[in-house]
Amino acid sequence: MKDMKRLIYVPILHARDDSRHTASVLDGNETGGSSGSGMRKELTAVDEMWEGIAAKIGELNLPLNRARIYQDGLPVCGNELEVVTRLAESGSPNFLFLLDLIQKRAKLEATEDLDLLVREYDLLNKLLMKNSSKDRKIMIAEYQSKSRELLTLRDEFILDRINTTLQPGEFPVVFMGVMHRLDKMLEKNFLVSYVIYRLPFRSIGTIYNA
Amino acid sequence: MKKKPETMKVLLIDDEPELLEVMKDLLEEQKYQLFCASGGIRGVELNEQQDPDLILLDLRMPGMDGIETLRSIRQSDEKVRVIILTGYGCPDTIRDAADLDVSEYLSKPFENEDLINVIARTLEA
């Protein structure tokens, strides 16, 4: 039997502000985070999820100097480390954790196709702008259907990134939204180890988690 | 107004007797009214009889597994809040659970304190 490489797969939930923040960092128009008690609860839930992920990954004692990180929503843009640093500075626990791994010598890899991300972002924005509750269910169903198609294209792109950028002796650490089906594609070539602790669905909502 | 734990009903569905015992002690210490089922079919029955505020559900059980159990519960009860507790998480089951409107997904082993916090927050929501 062929020796399969180990791959660490971390399913994550995105905070509502994540995609807006990433987009604003990329186009240079950074915005502040949202406020309000609902948002604070959501942010606490997200912080706790990342604390759990960090603890679980810590327990694995991975040789991080041989790890290559692939992050959901991080486009191939030439300044990936700057994007991660700025999102970490804005307080994102996801990107703070990536920065911590990078400081421990893990390598950061550009992961996603920028055009596909922009299409996903536009789709989500259209949904969020529609306020009529009458149309909302139809809009959500439409969004989910189109988003699924985009998600497949994004997963295919990410799979190709992993296969073409991983160097001999390295192993991938993949942080990916729960609605991606990339793990099914990866199982053909990798021994996938899942790292899961908490996923606070109701605190965050799945609509933001394509 | 925030409800007191003693007015809150929690249904625990898990096939591991040791875990049922530990959880029973832990949740009764917190003053929740606790009901236990050691399998999915009994869990569905108890949900109908007791109308709990919250279900703690194991995913891997012989016979009717956690996802089937939840699917069956959701046919008649869209409102009950559900926390999934599992030692065998993978994105497939996570996606199934998300489609069935779970509040939270927590992997075993977990710290008692984490579980208590998750339960309190879920019941407050």
Image (tube, helix red, strand yellow):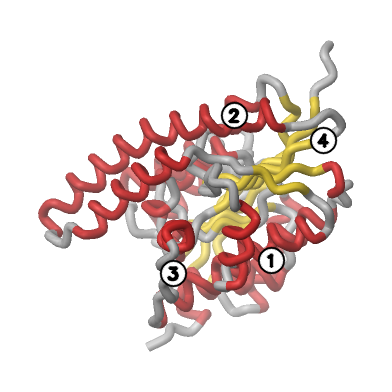
Distance (Cα) linking label 4 and label 2: 16 Å
Distance (Cα) linking label 3 and label 4: 34 Å
- Front residue (pair A13, A95): A95
Q: Amino acid at mark 2?
A: Leu
- Say what secondary structure mark 3 lies in: loop
Upstream in sequence: badge 4 or badge 2: 2
Chain letter behind tag 1: A
Chain letter behind tag 4: A
- Say what secondary structure mark 1 lies in: helix
The answer to whether marks 1 and 4 mark residues whose Cβ atoms lie closer than 8 Å is no
Distance (Cα) linking label 2 and label 3: 30 Å
Where residue A30 is drawn, which disc sits there? 3
- Front residue (pair A25, A145): A25
Upstream in sequence: badge 1 or badge 3: 3
Chain letter behind tag 2: A
Give me the residue at 40% from left, 80% from top: A35
- Say what secondary structure mark 2 lies in: helix
Give me the residue at 52% from left, 30% from top: A157
- When asked about the image quadrant of residue B65, the answer is top right
Upstream in sequence: badge 1 or badge 2: 1
- When asked about the image quadrant of residue A88, the answer is bottom right
- Front residue (pair A119, A142): A119
- Say what secondary structure mark 4 lies in: loop
Tags 1 and 4 on a common chain: yes
Q: Amino acid at mark 4?
A: Glu
- Position in image of residue B50 (x %, y %): 42, 61
Tags 1 and 2 on a common chain: yes
Tags 3 and 4 on a common chain: yes
Which residue position holds label 1?
A51
